[in-house]
Image: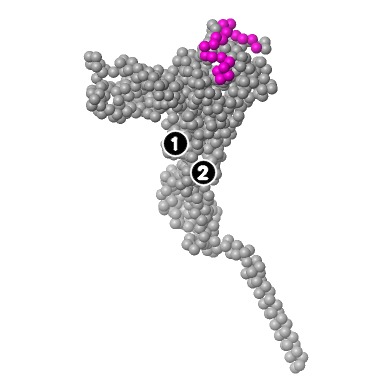
């Protein structure tokens, strides 16, 4: 009996010890879970019972200077399903087939696949998928993902400049890439409760951080100018069967870019349909020898350093010059020319002789002053500086070649900024493509005019402007001339370098111009790469493009002033000239009654009898209408077909008259 009692006691002690040990282990484990490793197990619990949903931030909108949206966000849906939990597979398949106008069998096959998860449709525009979204948004077996999608309303217009984004809405090229951090914004999150079956529900006591949308960007670009430049550039590209073409319009007073276009075109809505080369903005990435458009550098340097005056005679009568055994010709033989006529006729011989008189060091200095050989630092990815051989390597032949725009390369943007310096009186400006950035808080960051350096004096630049005006009126740039507009500019035709040698069949045709010459408000550079046919010159290929661009912009806008704001005396003289030109045109075009123009009814009352604009050219209709006192709005191109105010009607001075043109 004692033995039995003893055994029972031992068992009780052992069991008690075991229970105490188990209790200590449990308490230790609880202490470990609740105290020592509290955060670790808390995280495990969160993962099992909570779901962190990312709240996507809206990408900022890109606008033109007039707040016309060029890059926007639209909602796209993606539809998925849990096939094993769907009973009415055929009905669902037919609904999707009807919405997307496809065969329902492709959806039915997915739904009968036996998989736990299948995609039915992805990246569906809201306009197409909205009905399906409304019907199935609360169906737990149909999963709908909502995502912002980048869209470009004007397709190929400004395509290379704007660039594009990837599926995650991050910028991959163009302004989308350059300003990705500003446009992207900051994503937020929302914590949802998740049950054992994976169902997620919202709880107001769970954490939530709202997304912060990206900033909006206002460009210096003018959508209307952009359309005009792109249309005219494309027409020349097609007409001359060119390899590519590029153009840019700049406000010389501020450095703001109003339009920038390159051909072939690119639509960022359909990136996979285009070659990679079409996505580049070749105005900042591609370099070329500028040819005679570069002669303004030697001309500016010579005038500023007082090496020549416009009246000085330059010996050019032989039609050629020999430099280091190399014979360099003019495109035609001229008698001795004044320096002004050297520029007017784009004489190679005359330009080289002026450069020789100036010297290597001085010419090189002014090349740098004009910004060649260095990046403009525009806010755009991929810009190249061009090629400029160091002064130490300059020979007499190199001096001669560079003076006439060979042996040096630049971008179209560099050329445009150089001509802007001439147009604005001598200041080299940083090109601006972004006017302002508007943050979600409403704070606005505005880009201001940035002067890099002074290139030359205002007096020198005024002389250069006059020389370039004569070049257009009666020199190599006559095809850019428009009576009454005073366009100034310079042509350029350069042989392309192919396999290390100058080609005899491939050329770069360019024209750089600005207007009005007395008070330049717009600079336009057009470069056409490898135009085919005998008329491959800048004067016949590119100059007409600039002419058409300026003419259409003038017809479009009432803000382009044709007078000199800087000098009241010049302003008065300019007004007299303009009025005289208008009167001459009006006398030839307005219907007469005796010796009176019947468009004017009573100057004192301010009433006008509307002329018949039908069959008039755009320029003629504009001139006649404005001379009568009408506010003219031109739509289209070609001859006038319709007018909004009927002919012969008596209206007030300043009445708006819209005329529709067609070819």
Residue 20 in view in this figure: yes
Q: Position of residue 468 (x, y in %)?
A: 49, 18
Q: Nearer the viewer, residue 432 or 638?
A: 432
Examine the rendered structure and indicate whether residue 635 appears above or below residue 544.
Answer: below
Q: Mark on residue 65?
A: 1
Residue identifier under label 2: 183
Magenta-span inclusion, residue 319: yes
Residue 602: image quadrant is top left
- As drawn, is 21 to the left or to the right of 556? right
- Tag 1 or tag 2, which sits nearer the N-term? 1
At label 2, counting other C-alpha atoms closer than 10 Å, the crowd grade (few under 14, some 14-19, many 20 or more) is many
Q: Nearer the viewer, mark 2 or mark 1?
A: 1
Examine the rendered structure and indicate whether residue 368 appears above or below residue 143.
Answer: above
Q: Secondary structure at mark 1?
A: loop
Find the distance from the CA under tag 2 to the CA under tag 1: 17 Å
Examine the rendered structure and indicate whether residue 42 appears above or below residue 99.
Answer: below
Q: Residue at x 58, y 64 (%)?
A: 45
Examine the rendered structure and indicate whether residue 219 appears above or below residue 195.
Answer: above
Q: Residue at x 56, y 31 (%)?
A: 452
Q: Residue at x 40, y 24 (%)?
A: 568
Magenta-span inclusion, residue 381: no
Q: Position of residue 381 (x, y in %)?
A: 57, 35
Residue 507: image quadrant is top right
Q: Residue at x 66, y 69 (%)?
A: 32
- Magenta extent: 303-323
């Amino acid at each position: 009996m004692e033995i039995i009692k003893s055994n029972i006691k031992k068992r009780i002690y052992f069991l008690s010890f075991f229970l105490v040990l188990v209790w200590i282990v449990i308490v230790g484990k609880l202490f470990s879970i609740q105290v020592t490793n509290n955060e670790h197990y808390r995280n495990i619990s969160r993962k099992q019972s909570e779901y962190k949903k990312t709240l996507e931030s809206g990408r900022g909108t890109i606008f033109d200077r007039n707040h016309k949206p060029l890059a926007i966000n639209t909602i796209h849906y993606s539809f998925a399903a849990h096939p094993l939990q769907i009973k009415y597979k055929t009905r669902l398949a037919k609904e999707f087939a009807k919405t997307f106008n496809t065969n329902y069998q492709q959806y039915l096959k997915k739904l009968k696949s036996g998989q736990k998860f299948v995609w039915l449709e992805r990246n569906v525009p809201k306009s197409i998928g909205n009905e399906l979204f409304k019907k199935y948004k609360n169906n737990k077996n149909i999963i709908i993902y909502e995502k912002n999608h980048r869209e470009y309303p004007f397709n190929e217009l400004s395509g290379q400049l704007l660039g594009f984004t990837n599926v995650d809405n991050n910028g991959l090229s163009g302004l989308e890439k350059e300003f990705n951090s500003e446009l992207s914004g900051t994503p937020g999150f929302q914590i949802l409760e998740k049950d054992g079956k994976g169902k997620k529900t919202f709880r107001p006591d769970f954490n939530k951080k709202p997304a912060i949308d990206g900033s909006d960007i206002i460009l210096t670009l003018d959508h209307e100018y952009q359309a005009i430049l792109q249309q005219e550039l494309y027409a020349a590209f097609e007409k001359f069967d060119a390899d590519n073409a590029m153009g840019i319009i700049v406000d010389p007073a501020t450095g703001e870019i109003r339009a920038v276009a390159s051909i072939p075109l690119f639509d960022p809505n359909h990136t996979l349909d285009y070659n990679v080369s079409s996505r580049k903005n070749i105005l900042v990435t591609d370099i070329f020898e500028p040819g005679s458009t570069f002669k303004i550098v030697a001309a500016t340097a010579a005038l500023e350093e007082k090496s020549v005056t416009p009246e000085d005679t330059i010996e050019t009568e032989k039609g050629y010059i020999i430099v280091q055994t190399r014979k360099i010709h003019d495109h035609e033989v001229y008698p001795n020319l004044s320096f002004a006529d050297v520029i007017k006729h784009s004489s190679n011989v005359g330009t080289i002789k002026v450069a020789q008189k100036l010297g290597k060091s001085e010419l090189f200095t002014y090349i740098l002053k004009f910004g060649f050989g260095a990046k403009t630092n525009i806010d755009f990815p991929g810009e190249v500086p061009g090629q400029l051989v160091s002064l130490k390597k300059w020979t007499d032949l190199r001096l001669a070649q560079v003076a006439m725009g060979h042996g040096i390369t630049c971008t179209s943007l560099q050329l445009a900024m150089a001509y802007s310096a001439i147009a604005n009186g001598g200041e080299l400006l940083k090109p601006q493509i972004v006017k302002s950035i508007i943050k979600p808080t409403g704070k606005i960051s505005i880009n201001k005019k940035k002067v890099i350096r002074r290139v030359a004096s205002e007096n020198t630049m005024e002389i250069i402007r006059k020389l370039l005006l004569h070049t257009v009126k009666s020199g190599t740039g006559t095809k850019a001339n428009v009576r009454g507009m005073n366009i100034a500019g310079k042509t350029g035709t350069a042989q392309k370098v192919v396999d290390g040698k100058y080609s005899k069949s491939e050329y770069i045709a360019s024209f750089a111009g600005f207007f009005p010459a007395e008070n330049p408000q717009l600079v336009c550079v057009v470069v056409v790469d490898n135009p085919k046919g005998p008329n491959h010159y800048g004067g016949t290929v590119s100059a007409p493009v600039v002419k058409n661009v300026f003419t259409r912009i003038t017809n479009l806008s009432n803000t382009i002033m044709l007078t000199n704001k800087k000098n009241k005396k010049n302003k008065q003289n300019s007004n007299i000239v303009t009025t005289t030109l208008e009167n001459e045109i009006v006398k030839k075009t307005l219907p007469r009654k005796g010796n009176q123009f019947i468009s004017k009814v009573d100057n004192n009352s301010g009433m006008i009898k509307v002329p018949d604009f039908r069959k008039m050219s755009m320029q003629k209709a504009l001139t006649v209408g404005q001379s009568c006192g009408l506010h003219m709005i031109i739509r289209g191109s070609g001859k006038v077909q319709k007018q909004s105010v009927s002919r012969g009607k008596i209206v007030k001075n300043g009445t708006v008259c819209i005329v529709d043109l067609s070819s």
